[in-house]
Image (spheres, helix red, strand yellow):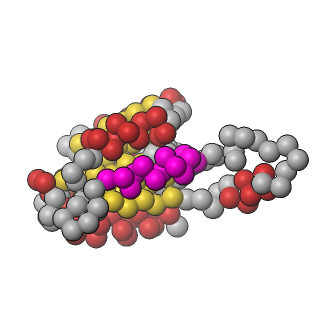
Amino acid sequence: LKHAIIDQYATPFASKTGSRSIDNRVAFIDGYAGPGRYEDGEEGSGAMLLRKAHELAKLPRKLELHFVEDDAKTVAQLRKVVAAEGADVTTTITVGNISKQLPDLLKQAEGIPLFVYLDPCGLIIPLDEVARIFDRPRGLGAPATEVLINLSASLRRFAGILTSAKPVEGSL
């Protein structure tokens, strides 16, 4: 479902916001990027965004893709996907935690529309850090900023921590 949302929404977002952006640039940050493409060949978010970048280049829109993944083995696979499918797309791939990378990525997207996709397997970035994404300029003429967060994966488990006799501070 979340990949279907990105697949259907990336084009209208980049088309509309990129029409008034500096050099038609639009940034996408995938904070939990994964391998880009799954073992069975199916598109992950990385391959999907690379495909969208090629499709949108015809408008012209220049998608700048920023992938963050904390697992080195997964990043190696993602690098292969980007090398094979995104040689002409502006991309960054960072091994690490999105919390630590976010300030730099926000600077790279300064002044242009931004879409942030956060789909964690485990603990999500603290919501006060997510709020920093919206500290970008607002109002008439400011670049659009949108965030898609998947909270469903662990919400029930984390909600149980609220009433636990031994709550895990990091999860709270």
Nearer the observer, 70 or 72: 70
Q: Which picture quadrant has residue 19?
A: bottom left
Nearer the observer, 166 or 44: 166
Which residue sits at x=76%, y=41%?
168
Task: Work out which residue is located at the far right of the displayed protein and give it.
Answer: 165
Residue 132 magenta-drawn?
yes
**Is 32 left or right of 124, judged from the image as shown?**
left
Residue 136, given in percent of the width and then of the height, sits at 31, 53
Which residue sits at x=22%, y=53%?
112
Can you say whether 121 is above or below 80 in the image?
below
Q: Which picture quadrant has residue 59?
A: bottom left
Which residue sits at x=46%, y=34%?
100
Can you say whether 155 is above or below 33 in the image?
below
Residue 10, given in percent of the width and then of the height, sits at 33, 64
Residue 147, given in percent of the width and then of the height, sits at 42, 59
Count of marks overlaid on the render: 0
Q: Which stretch appears magenta?
A: 124-136
Residue 85, given in percent of the width and then of the height, sits at 30, 45
Which residue sits at x=42%, y=36%?
101
On the question of residue 157 being in view, the answer is no
Can you say whether 144 is above or below 130 in the image?
below
On the question of residue 125 being in view, the answer is yes
Residue 101 magenta-drawn?
no
**Is 168 left or right of 10, judged from the image as shown?**
right
